[in-house]
Image (spheres, grey):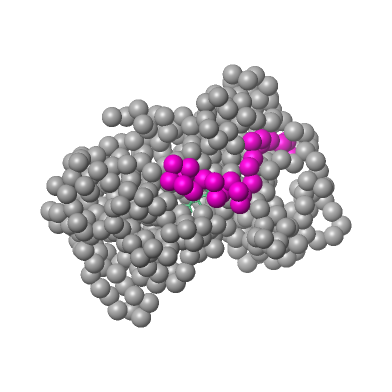
Amino acid sequence: MAYSDPIIISGAGPVAMVLAVALYRQGVPFISFEQLPEPFVDQRAASHHPPTVEMLDKIGLAEHMINEGLKSPIYRFHDRVTHDVIAEFDLGLLSDEVPFPYVVQYEQYKLVRKILELFGHNSDFNVQFSRAVKGFKQYGDHVIVEIENADGSSEMVRGSFLVGCDGGRSTVRKTADISFEGFTYPEKFIKIGTYFDLTAHDNRIAIRNYFSHPEEWCNLFRVKGEPDKPDIWRFVVPMRVGESEEEAKTPHAMQRRLKRFFPRDEDYEIAYANVYTVSQCVASSFNKGRIVLAGDSAHVNNPIGGMGLNGGIHDAINLASKLVPLWRGELGMECLDLYTRQRHKASTDFTQAQTIANKKQLEEKDPAKRKRRLDEMRAMSEDPIKAKAYMRRAQLIDSVKAADAIT
Ligand SMILES: Cc1cc2nc3c(=O)[nH]c(=O)nc-3n(C[C@H](O)[C@H](O)[C@H](O)COP(=O)(O)OP(=O)(O)OC[C@H]3O[C@@H](n4cnc5c(N)ncnc54)[C@H](O)[C@@H]3O)c2cc1C
């Protein structure tokens, strides 16, 4: 059957906005409800892998992020104990396989901001702020979604489908009673951004770096500054188990953390710091009747490897390819089961498996195992066939192919 009611999206984060553009470009009406009064300036994701850039190119967004972000074909693994560069991977090796053989560093808030700048002035690009999704009921051919306004008043809105793009604590997932299975790491992670130019300090630093250390591993990535500001180097490091956010964010604690990596007499100029509780969880299903989940509402993982938002964008693009013909009456409801089968596999077999392995790799404590893992990483980077196989997995190229192969 064909529908006339809009598709309702809970949230206006990056996954919601990519889904919105994909629906809008195909002329399918939607309303996105966002609980916050304005787009969140969120310093979490920044790395967009080659398949993500390719997907965003198909909906006209890639050129903006490439022009405004940083292209990063190379990334390096460092041993923080010996100060050696263990391995370098060059995505240029995949240039005969993917149209964008590099990662684009472009923060998620810039992606949301760009989408609203490009499309927000169109009345049918319907994004409503200060409007929270509180619950829903679903019927044979529609959903009724309860919306709460900033003044506490509520309203019922009718839609054809409801997509939960409302993050790890998703109201949609909880109301649909879909379980979220996995675990939470005992230690929190802190992200500290500094304006200090680390390449001037150590020319072995690439735009994207991983540091292995038994007590204090690190992801170190560069992102482009706002027009009037220098670029920012973002450290993500583990906190001590039990260390509070207040302790970790004192200027003294932050300076000590950065100086353990790059000793210097002067203090670092801190751009921002955020503390995160990190979990590995996947929803048991990504659809239930007319309710669908995408992005962090369906899966969360640690940020090592930069995969969470990438997987969420892959969800959004895959889901749009089903919702558009379903809404037009060209496909049946079973296409949403296929969406779950495809994206659930991508999430569990690839994103979850790879991010868990990435963390173990960086934090290995046993000296013999650690040496073996680092030797393997070095050997892999020196063998072009193995390096390409590794990058296809680490850059989520394999995950998209495996999902698409499910029919
Ligand atoms: C330190 C760190 C670094 C990371 N780096 C990367 C990276 O480099 N690459 C990568 O791929 N991923 C990365 N991630 C993961 C990435 O940030 C998330 O996967 C991404 O934010 C998910 O986007 P989303 O749109 O699904 O959810 P969110 O970004 O959480 O957006 C959800 C939106 O829904 C809104 N909302 C919530 N509830 C409601 C409601 N009831 N009604 C209406 N609106 C609601 C929220 O206000 C929010 O705007 C990182 C994560 C961390 C912690």
Front residue of 260/106: it is 106
Q: Residue at x 27, y 75 (%)?
A: 154
Is 270 rendered above or below residue 288? Answer: below
**Is residue 66 inside the magenta stretch?**
yes
Front residue of 148/246: it is 148
**How many badges with numbers are in the image?**
0
**Is residue 264 inside the magenta stretch?**
no
Is 152 rendered above or below residue 258? Answer: below
Front residue of 21/163: it is 21
Q: Position of residue 197 (x, y in %)?
A: 77, 52
Q: In the image as oriented, which residue stretches furthest toward the bottom?
A: 151
Q: Position of residue 28 (x, y in %)?
A: 29, 53
Front residue of 332/182: it is 332
Is 194 rendered above or below residue 203? Answer: below
Q: Residue at x 64, y 40 (%)?
A: 72
Is 300 situated left or right of 105 in this image?
A: left
Q: Residue at x 47, y 69 (%)?
A: 38
Is 340 situated left or right of 209 in this image?
A: left
Q: Position of residue 34 (x, y in %)?
A: 39, 65
Question: Quarter-wise, where is residue 330 in the image?
Answer: top left
Is 106 situated left or right of 152 in this image?
A: right
Q: Residue at x 30, y 67 (%)?
A: 134
Q: Position of residue 107 (x, y in %)?
A: 57, 53
Q: Which residues are magenta?
A: 56-80
- Which quadrant is home to the C terminus? top left
Residue 379 seen by the camera:
no
Residue 334 seen by the camera:
yes
